[in-house]
Image (cartoon, rainbow, N blue to C red):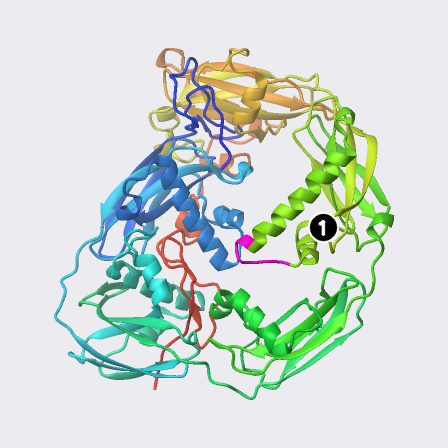
Amino acid sequence: MKRILMLMAMTLGLALISGCEKPAPTPNPEPKPEPPQPVLQSFEVAVNAVTETSMTYTVTPSVLDQEYIAVVKTKESLAALQDEQIVEAVFEDIKAAAASSGITFNEKMAAIAAKGVSENVEITGLAVDTEYSLVVFGVDPSKDWEYTTFPVVKDFKTNAVEVVEYTFDVTATVEYNTVSFQVVPSDNTVAWHLITVTKDMYDYYTDPAGEAAWTKEVFYQAYVESEIQSYAEAGYTEDEILAAMFLTGEQSLYAEGLNANTEYVYFVAAFKIEGTQLYIASEIAEGAYTTGEAPKTELTFDISVTDVDQMRAAIKITPSDLQAPFCWIVQTYDGVSTPTEVMDGVVAANKMFLDMGFMSSYGVQDYTGGPGSPYKYKVGSPDTDFCVIAFGYAGGVTSEPEMVTFRTLPGGNPADCVFEAEILNVSTYEFSFKVTPSDPTTYFTGDVCLASEYDEARIAEEIEAGIQELYDMQAMFGSPMEMSDLIANYFWNGESVMDAQALTPDTEYTMYLVALDQKTGKVAKIHVFPAFAKTKPVGTVVPELELIGYFSGDDENGAVFGQPAATAGMCIAVVKYNADPTATVYSSILEGNGMDTEQYPDATIMDNAYWQEVNMNEPYSFFLMNWDADNTAFAYAVDANGGQGGVSRLLLNCSEANKNNIDELFALIDQVYGQTSTTTSVASLNISEVKSEPVVTVREKAETLSVEPSPMVARPVEQRALKSGNLMQLDYVPTFWVK
């Protein structure tokens, strides 16, 4: 995580309407160990209610228009962790959940981040009689979701359930990679549920020295909840879920398509069902078994490869059984390996993904670019031998492989490629440009530098060394690539848009593009563009900050902003921005006295403040702050020529002695927005994240923790176990069906 440098200790003031805030550095700070961490805002966190498997909470931030996340982890998993380590542990959970859902970390964070008051958010799927911690901290979406505050941790414990003396007699019978269970409960009236997972998966989560360090009970409860969520995401009603998952009396169950030659464990327990609440009501019975080979099938494939050019081929695969799962892949071919050898290599390199079902296909795969086909298949390398291979796979290989080879047409010599470069945008600190190569098969990279720093030999040496290091790292971590594949994956080809950032104002830069030999990873030729672009000078427009007044949040009482609980006991500072109407203005606020430009230069403020564009048709910010505390409002402008000017500052300090009459605030709202000072009128303005309608909570935006729905569920249900504070997708988990 990028380190955030702050010179003043700060707590973020709340921007109620157009301002954007971020904690400000405190003057003359006490020496602190590196790295210093900012405090952007504070949170009031309350655990409202706790049941056997659920809890509700309310988070009230001091800043209503800045993002934060709230997640639940077991208290044991956070034991002995420092603040930064707690944040990292939460981020790792979210990254794992994002990967399991097939989305990026940023997309996941955008889904679960909250703003404003999150009131009575319910978290379900918790384990009975277990200590948990609710973790809340601020994040900054503009900086790749860096954390902006230390975490607030609120501990709680779920209620206990009386355990009844139910027992289960379970017999597991294995045939190939299919297992049959005969389950005989001691009480035929009790509802029960059986799960089975790989022993590796179970050991991962229950390892006392591991990241999760769960008990058997926590693991079982989390897994059951993940199944419930998967059914719910597939559209099943609560009654259908209960009927599908929870059985009574003696039953015969089976599961097929398990990982071949793999050790599994199973668990079964009785459940108490009260409305929508589920409780484990018995000791958990457990056992183990080991699968055999996957059964062979007569699955065959018709593979056609036509219309091959330099970078694409028309590929179509038709299996003999449209319902059978299979794997297919296109990759470079060495010219000598047999289909079986190629298949074995694919399985060895991708077994985890194959066993999780990520590489399973069904039915016709058409990438010919014709009707019903999305496009021709892109292979990425000219003048290269490729193969298309397909084979049945359901926990293990189920059919003989079939393979077709082809060779792409020759591309141009990268040393002969000519580049055109067009400037798209230039500002004070960056510029962007479009690159168009004469040969779309040539891969390239590039950068900018000062004319005095351009050294072609050094550039070539550094680029080749970097490519070699990347190549070696791929092999080190068990995913080796052919050099041509690595170049295709990590570098540009064809028309591309590139950005040069963090540049010096009013400075001329040389740009260079480096054509690469795809087969060797060596530099084929460097194309230099002297005096390519010059950044704009620092702008001349500096906005004026005008204090309109200080108002009591108690007097406002929700009449303007619709959140009386947030404004209660606080001061509302109103700031107006005055600037050349042709300029674009950005604002922020930090707690502390930041008026000393030598101690806190513009560069420091620019790097550490959280900026938001000001709507100059409504040039006001409404900052929520503590009484009798220094805060500093900041603003800068980008002039009509794209020049970014210096930072202007305004020291704010609210006190009861200098507060204004609340009627002045109501009159200002009426004057600026042309409506009466009502919650509805302000909410309709779309100038603030603080609105009258209910705040979208973390839970409403996405399942944030405990258990997250599986992204791949079908009828009959084929489900995966996830890790979102819970289970990680380590293996493919089939559904049990009553025989």
Relative image position of residue 244 (x, y in whole percent) = 34, 76
- Amino acid type, label 1: Gly
Q: Which residues are magenta?
A: 476-481
Q: Is residue 366 something one can see in this rendering?
A: yes
Task: Identify the residue at image location x=41%, y=23%.
Answer: 625
* Image location of residue 304, percent across then percent down: 73, 78
Local crowd size for mark 1, using a 10 Å CA cut-off: few (<14), some (14–19), many (≥20): many
Q: Quadrant of residue 33?
A: top left
Residues 567 and 481: in front is 481
Residue 707 vertical position relative to residue 261 in the rendered view, above or below: above
Residue that carries the numbered disc 1 in the rendered image: 521
Q: Is residue 96 above or below residue 164?
A: above
For the point 53% across and 49% down, the residue is 107
Does 299 sit left or right of 371 as displayed? left
Instruction: Answer whether residue 375 is magenta in the image.
Output: no
Q: Secondary structure at mark 1?
A: loop
